[in-house]
Amino acid sequence: MKEKVFGGGKMSKYVDFIKVLKSNDSKEYMKDFSECAVKTIQGDAESFKQLIEMFLNAPAFYKNISFIEKLQSFLRGTCTDESYYKDLAEIIAEGNQTANAERILDCLDALETEEKVIYVINATRSCIRFHRGMTGINQSQYFRILYIIKNILLEDIEFLTEKLKLGEVLDSDSCVALENLGLMYITTSDKEVKYAFSKLAYTFYDEVIRGDNEVLSKVEEPSEFPMKMDMGTKIVEF
């Protein structure tokens, strides 16, 4: 199945796009829109209704921005009843409430495929499970994982899914990319560079990629991780 890609027409076809964006009306609209989006993420149902109304009455070019579509998918997939809204609001309230809500919205806005929205849903529901005292990811891991979802290539997700069960693999472009995201680390470079998957990689696969997908098999985390090359000690994971 071809992956759904968000977004559409080229901005260049809007002759006055830049002029409109710089106008005071546009700035005020986007300010109000952003405030409603933050309140919606915090569990305010009235703000969500207002957000939809603002979107439907927006200037034509705004409707090519897919943010509202991704936000709707996220809320429908995450908050299946009022208790989920309440738990998500409590998670967001830990620390800087507005900043935390904006981090979620910023991640959603940057996602280019429906598959990645599903990953954010899986991560959020995992964090809610942890909040309820079950197995899942904590708030710190949650925002770290949102950063990963936002920046990881789908090709590197496929690589991780395929190679995770091996534990260690030879150097490749995907290894370097995953190392930069904290999902792999170098173990040796005697004759050939090898990389191992980090503890976070196993969490990312199980809680985010696999989620409730029964087609993907569970990959057990190793009882011991290979030594990190430049430290000479057992790797310590966050």
Image: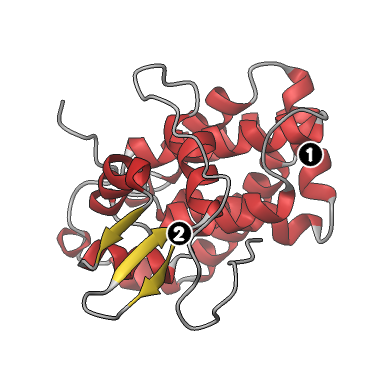
Give the residue drawn at x 35%, y 65%. 195
Which residue corresponds to mark 2?
Answer: 183
Q: Is residue 32 visible?
A: no
In front: label 2 or label 1 = 2
Q: Which residue is mark 1?
A: 89
Q: Amino acid at mark 1?
A: Ala
Quick check: 141 above or below 26? above
Q: Amino acid at mark 2?
A: Leu
Residue 60 at x, y = what percent? 33, 46
Q: In this rendering, would 30 be left or right of 197?
A: right
Q: Which mark is residue 52?
A: none
- Of residue 189 and residue 109, the one placed in the foreground of this image is 189
Compare residues 162 and 123 and report the one nearer the observer: 162
Measure the alpha-carbon separation of dots 2 and 1. Answer: 28 Å
Crowdedness of circle 2 by 10 Å Cα count: few (<14), some, many (20+)? many
Residue at the (16%, 25%) spot, across then down: 1
Q: In which image quadrant can residue 175 be found?
A: bottom left
